[in-house]
Amino acid sequence: MTSQLELFDGFILGIETSCDETAAAVIRNGREVMSSVIASQVERHAPFGGVVPEIASRAHLELLQPSVEQAVTDAGLALGDLDAIAVTRGPGLAGALLVGLAGAKGLALALRIPLVGVNHLEGHLFSVLLERPDFTPPAVALIVSGGHTMLVHMADWGEYQVVGTTLDDAAGEAFDKIGRFLGMGFPGGPAIDQASRTGDADAYDLPRPMIDDGYDFSLSGLKTAVVLAVEAEERAGHQIVVDDMAASFQEAVVDVQVRKTLRVVDDLGVGRVLMGGGVAANSRLRDRMRDGCKAAGVECFASSTGLCTDNGAMIAAAGAYRLVVNGPSSLDIGVDPSLKDPFSLVTTGASTGNVAADSRLGS
Ligand code: KG4
Ligand code: ZN
């Protein structure tokens, strides 16, 4: 039996600055999104082919205050109407997290309202509640983002055991590296998703690393296979068809993610799957997971794509839960770039990739 979910009753401002989106949102009673502002920094990082931490911190400094003001105005409120502030305190980039946390503390102090620090990944889980209030644990959650790939046994809200993780790259990281390698710009994930709609997923025969081997993931071998396939074509004087390669790569990633998620579902005898994180916005993953869940007789939950990628509403939603369960955070909490709590983690292994090929992809 799972416990009844109690959420903070009032207006919560959620602030998210863990990576390259400056996001602020206001939600009511833990479930109703009243506004959501996401100031993307993509154009600032794109020339470098990836997120540059120093640029991210400076951009957050510039964008945080206007984003918060916009979120409060869009909600039809004034700052004084807010009842609490939730903010991401980890995991993420230290400098980026610091900007959000410092801003949130200052505002909470000035407005004399509670502050609550939130784990970004718990935010990704709570995003589902904003659109699917019918979701209840127990469930198996697949969290796939730029920084994480995790299979989580979610026994209840707040009870998360990580049963599978990545031995090397996070899913979004691999999408971004392959996108960059194929000359598709940054971020690679949405570009590969788009290109795959016209690409042939059977055009290149790529491996499905560790597909029948436990719950952990590895993407090094797959990335290496893409590099080697492109090099083989180059040597033969041919050019690869980028859309076909994108689709073949995406299909391999999706195959492994769907198969492993359903294996955990089967092994644990759980009737629900939840998907969260930026890569859960991938159209092929969503379709294949829905089909797989249907065939297995389990329910599949995923937020709409705009709530899968980083946003302030999911942080406010997780904050609405944490405020009830843990109470307000102290004003002297710090950021934690590798925050684990409340996830209990399994240990990860070493990289299994081809170092020479990996060096063509960059870090
Ligand atoms: O959750 P998120 O917004 O930020 C982190 O917490 O990391 O995830 C960002 C990641 C990026 O790597 C981006 O390329 C990937 O999510 N992503 C996608 C798609 N949309 C975003 N990957 C594949 N297909 C998509 N449609
Ligand atoms: Zn995220």
Image (cartoon, helix red, strand yellow):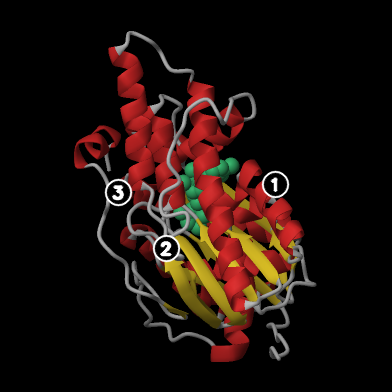
Instruction: Give the mark, 2 or 1, whose residue is nearer the N terminus.
Output: 2
User: From this viewpoint, is residue 277 visible?
Assistant: no
Secondary element at image label 2: loop
* Residue picked out by circle 3: 54
Ligand 1 neighbours mark 1 (CB distance < 8 Å): no
- Does 160 sit above or below residue 337? below
* Dot 2 crowding, Cα within 10 Å, few <14, some 14–19, many 20+: many
Front-lying residue, 26 or 76: 26
* Residue picked out by circle 1: 287
Farthest residue, direction right: 134
In space, the residues marked 3 and 1 are separated at their CA atoms by 37 Å
Residue type (three-letter) at the residue carrying disc 2: Asp
In space, the residues marked 3 and 2 are separated at their CA atoms by 32 Å
Secondary element at image label 1: helix
Look at 72% across and 62% down and name the residue there: 296
Instruction: Give the mark, 3 or 1, whose residue is nearer the N terminus.
Output: 3
* Residue picked out by circle 2: 216
Q: Check the picture and name the quadrant holding the C terminus.
A: top left
Instruction: Give the mark, 3 or 2, whose residue is nearer the N terminus.
Output: 3
x and y, in percent, of residue 119 in the image: 48, 72
x and y, in percent, of residue 45 in the image: 39, 38
Look at 59% across and 26% down and name the residue there: 200
